[in-house]
Image (cartoon, grey):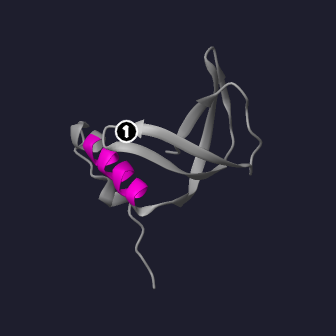
């Protein structure tokens, strides 16, 4: 699953944008790369993206918020299952 945001002005694949949104754990702000495809809706364009730069505090707030959502799901998933192993 890719994160996406709603916009009235679609961006081109590969464009870099600033993304900011409010979560239950606080605001998250980072840089993102636009992905395809876009999906048009009556409210605008649903635009998928991937984070390319995210400060530690923003990452923590996003992860905490995702953990909360996963904990409430029927599957009881934790976002930690999606962690890639860290290499040095």
Asked if residue 47 lies in the magenta stretch, the reply is no
Locate residue 79, reporting x and y percent.
Answer: 32, 53
Residue 87 vertical position relative to residue 9 in the rendered view, above or below: below
Pointer 1 residue: 23
34 left or right, relative to 4? right
The residue at 42%/76% (across/down) is 86
Secondary structure mainly formed by the magenta segment:
helix
The residue at 45%/81% (across/down) is 87
Neighbour class for label 1 at 10 Å: few (<14), some, many (≥20)? few
Asked if residue 61 lies in the magenta stretch, the reply is yes
In the orientation shown, which residue stands out farthest toward the bottom? 88
Residue 71 vertical position relative to residue 9 in the rendered view, above or below: below
The residue at 44%/46% (across/down) is 28
Depth check: 52 or 72 in front? 52
The residue at 31%/59% (across/down) is 80
Instruction: Please state the extent of the stretch shown in magenta in the rendering.
Output: 57-68
């Amino acid at each position: 699953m890719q994160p996406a945001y709603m916009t009235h002005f679609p961006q081109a694949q590969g464009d870099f944008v600033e993304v900011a949104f409010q979560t239950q754990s606080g605001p998250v702000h980072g840089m993102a790369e636009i992905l395809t495809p876009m999906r048009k809706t009556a409210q605008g364009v649903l635009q998928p993206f991937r984070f390319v730069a995210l400060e530690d505090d923003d990452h923590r707030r996003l992860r905490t918020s995702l953990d909360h959502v996963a904990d409430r799901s029927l599957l009881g998933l934790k976002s930690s299952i999606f962690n890639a192993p860290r290499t040095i």
